[in-house]
Amino acid sequence: MSPAALLITGPPASGKTTLGRALAAELGGCLLDMDVLTGALTEAIGELVGTADLDAPALSGRIRVARYESLLATAEDNLRVGVPVVLIAPFTAERTDPAAWAAARDRLSAAGGAPRLVWLRLPADELLRRLRVRAAGRDAAKLADPNAFLARHPLTPPVVEHHEVDATEDLTSQLGGILSSSS
């Protein structure tokens, strides 16, 4: 049986990291959080180009491609030695563009994995509440103009095959739904 390759996606503050940690522990797998893998380097680049906003042109485009390349290459290495992986990232292109999803899925499959996209669904009012509670610097622009943020980042589910999880459920229920659907 191929090791799992679970790609966790959802809006900010939906619980991607919390769920990812729990899944990695349950699977005995490697947790690959893009913010952890590439955060320090992205922050350094942001300082050099004068922005911390990941949506700014200076940090999107080539920097986004490099961040995802680092994430996927690390996942491939783990899968090749039989270790399940849990990848945490927005996966915006992969969930909105079937060709981008196919490319990521095919890469992870070729490395021996069984990839599945997991979407954390969260209503807008709960998302904004969680962002306010989290109070992270990276969320300041989102909260300064929530309507503009939600217009740029709609809370629509992926257009590709995925497993949907209600992010308002408790962690045990979220885990149970994912793990039972993979057996």
Image (tube, grey):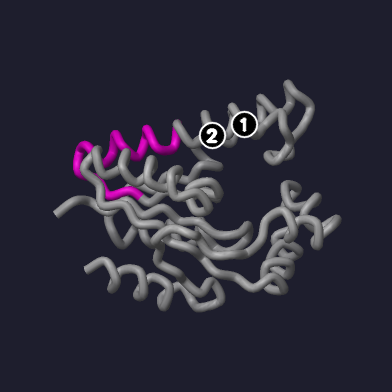
Q: Residue furthest right?
A: 144
For mark 2, give the secondary structure.
helix
Residue name at image x 75 percent, y 48 percent: 137
Q: Is residue 158 left or right of residue 41?
A: left
x, y percent for residue 119: 48, 63
The region drawn magenta spans 70-85
* Quarter holding residue 35: top right
Q: Is residue 165 above or below residue 148?
A: below
Q: Is residue 83 magenta?
A: yes
* Quarter holding residue 174: bottom left
x, y percent for residue 152: 72, 53
Q: Which is the main secondary structure of the residues drawn in magenta?
A: helix
**Crowd class of label 1 (few under 14; some 14 to 19; many from 20; radius 10 Å):** few
What residue does disc 1 label? 61
* Quarter holding residue 55: top right
Q: Is residue 160 above or below residue 179?
A: above
